[in-house]
Amino acid sequence: MKESINLQIHPNPGIISDTMTQGIIILGSANSQGDTFKHAHYLSQLTGFPMLDLKTKNILPFDYEFKNQEDDFLDTFKEIVDNYNLLIFATPVYWYSMSGIMKIFFDRISDCLKIHKDSGRKLRGKKMAVLSAGYDRELKPGFHMPFIESAKYLGMTYVGDTHLAEEKSDLENQNAIHEFAQRLQPDTQGATP
């Protein structure tokens, strides 16, 4: 039996305008309490955006015969596209790329281009951003390419990214998240689901 997604709404402490409530942070980490979660949680506190932890969902890999339709993907996807205009993908950097959990989620979007087209079309006009976390201060070239190109292909607007690192101080990371939240603010004002 499918369960509805449980979005945890974090209170907005008033740092950023309340008009930002049309975004969602999609956490794709193997560690639901790790560094990526901590950074995403801080962004959630700044923006008031809810956070969805993909690890808590039963989302199976893409299947060309679509034998995976009883998992949590479609209900989760519909909840996201029906209610949010800005999708922020929060991923750790694993082997110079997005996490496996995040990659599976992206692969499953193909379901919504092939058999659940009405849901897939709802991505058009939405916005995408990325929060990444890893050890190294700088990302290797090309890390954001799958996100940027996916946004283009899906008719979305890629509005930016931030990278947080263990090599940076806590203050550097917090400042980067705060600046990222500020950059996202104009991208959600006036948008309608």
Image (tube, rainbow, N blue to C red):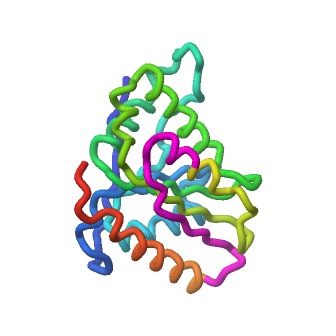
Measured as percent of width and height from the top left, residue 142 is found at 71, 56
When asked about the image quadrant of residue 9, the answer is bottom left
Question: Which residue appears at 47% of the width and 40% of the height?
Answer: 154
Is 39 within the magenta?
A: no
When asked about the image quadrant of residue 82, the answer is top left
Count numbered badges in the picture: 0
Which range of residues does the magenta coloring cover? 149-169
Question: Which residue appears at 71% of the width and 66% of the height?
Answer: 139
- Residue 87 drawn above or below residue 164: above
Is 150 within the magenta?
A: yes
Measured as percent of width and height from the top left, residue 99 is found at 64, 49
- Residue 38 drawn above or below residue 114: below
Measured as percent of width and height from the top left, residue 151 is found at 50, 47
- Residue 153 drawn above or below residue 126: above
Horizontal side, residue 131 vs residue 186: left or right: right
Q: Which is more toward the observer, 150 or 2?
A: 150
Question: Which residue appears at 72% of the width and 71% of the height?
Answer: 138
Where's the N terminus, which quadrant?
top left
Q: Which is more toward the observer, 19 or 28?
A: 19
Measured as percent of width and height from the top left, residue 61 is found at 59, 29
